[in-house]
Amino acid sequence: MKSLCLPPKISIIIPVYNVENYIAKCLDTCIAQTLYDIEIVCVDDGSTDGSGRILDHYAALDNRVKVIHKQNAGVSAARNDGIRASSGTWLMFVDSDDYLALNACEVVWKESLSNSSELIVHGGYLVPDYPKPESWKYWGVITDKKYYREFEFRVLEERGSNPFLWLQAFRRDLLERTGVWFREDISFGEDIIFQFENLPFAKGISFIKDRLYYYRWYRDGSLMKEATADLDARTMRHILNIGILADYWLEHGLMEKYGDRFLGWAVGFVVPDLEQLELKDPKALASALKETLESRGLDKFRAKLPRIPSRQYRKMVSLAKG
């Protein structure tokens, strides 16, 4: 006889790695959600500190907490393991050193009942206040109320749409239809790839103004801090990810409609760094970006670029020439 139990409304998926000083705060806010019908899937990605013991303690206190212990394989693999182990109608991704507003799940669920959306984007806060975050981070976590019945490229230009994965809730149906999970061979920028490969196929996208997430944007030993230590390597990773996304969009026929917008986004994503950051070899990076775009035939959209992306494209060509 089949079980009559309904799946939880929301699955919160938390990849965990060496965050013994932060994970309790994260779990406290998940357990105290005003929406009770949730599950909290924690994937201990081979932690060598006390994180795993803390997870087991919380699982013993609340049967909504599921814990997976595994060998270290990176955040993408951990999130994928969390998806496999989850059963909620909606998926929310929380980083283990961050935490939620206590009504986060309730607000997301009520919004899902108001609109037939498969993606809900909400706002957040940055913690700590010092050192002072870059201005684009402040801008990126404050969202406006909007609704898209179907995908338009400007969805990807809305605040909250990228790169902050944890500002978004995904209906499981969307991931099952696209078959897009996290690429486990990529350790930086995997969230943008996940977004750019899923969002174009979402049936309904809601942006809400509620600020439901607390993002710990800076801490010693964080993966982001390590990733930004070598600016040339980070910029090259962005370029490689643009190539991955371009291939995916070409394969799925998205460039036919959005090629000029994608090209404008790509140069706008990288060229400001080529101009402003203290890079060791901006010429090589500009050449790599130019080759990435031209080898996919995206240079044919150059004539359609608006003024600012057009200037950025010319700057890329100039830097590549040296």
Image (spheres, helix red, strand yellow):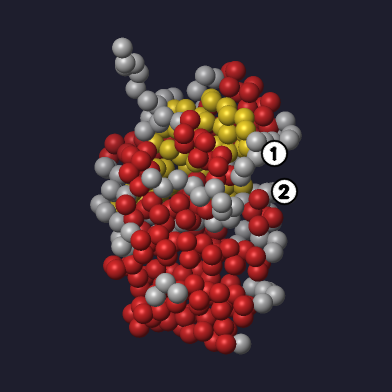
Ranked by sequence position, the earlier of labels 2 and 1 is: 1
Q: Residue 128 in the image: state x and y as whole percent.
A: 65, 49
* Residue bearing the label numbered 2: 221
Distance of mark 2 from mark 1, alpha carbons?
A: 9 Å
**In percent of the image, x 50 and y 23: which residue is there?**
64
Other residues around mark 2 within 10 Å, as few (<14) / some (14–19) / many (≥20): few
**In percent of the image, x 33 and y 80: which residue is there?**
304
Local secondary structure at mark 2: loop
Asked if the residue under mark 1 is in contact with the one under mark 2, i.e. CB atoms within 8 Å, the reply is: yes
Q: Is residue 34 visible?
A: no
Q: Residue 63 in the image: state x and y as whole percent.
A: 52, 19
Residue 302 sits in quarter: bottom left
Q: Is residue 279 visible?
A: yes
User: Is 186 or 110 nearer to us in this picture?
Assistant: 186
User: Is 180 or 47 nearer to us in this picture?
Assistant: 180
**In percent of the image, x 64 and y 54: which residue is there?**
224
Of the residues shown, which amino acid type is indicated by label 1? Asn
**In percent of the image, x 52 and y 53: which residue is there?**
190
Please tell me the numbered disc located at residue 196: none
Q: Residue 279 in the image: state x and y as whole percent.
A: 67, 74
Of the residues shown, which amino acid type is indicated by label 2? Gly
Q: Residue 294 in the image: state x and y as whole percent.
A: 44, 77
Other residues around mark 1 within 10 Å, as few (<14) / some (14–19) / many (≥20): many
* Residue bearing the label numbered 1: 18
Instruction: Name above or below for residue 55 compared with residue 96.
Output: above
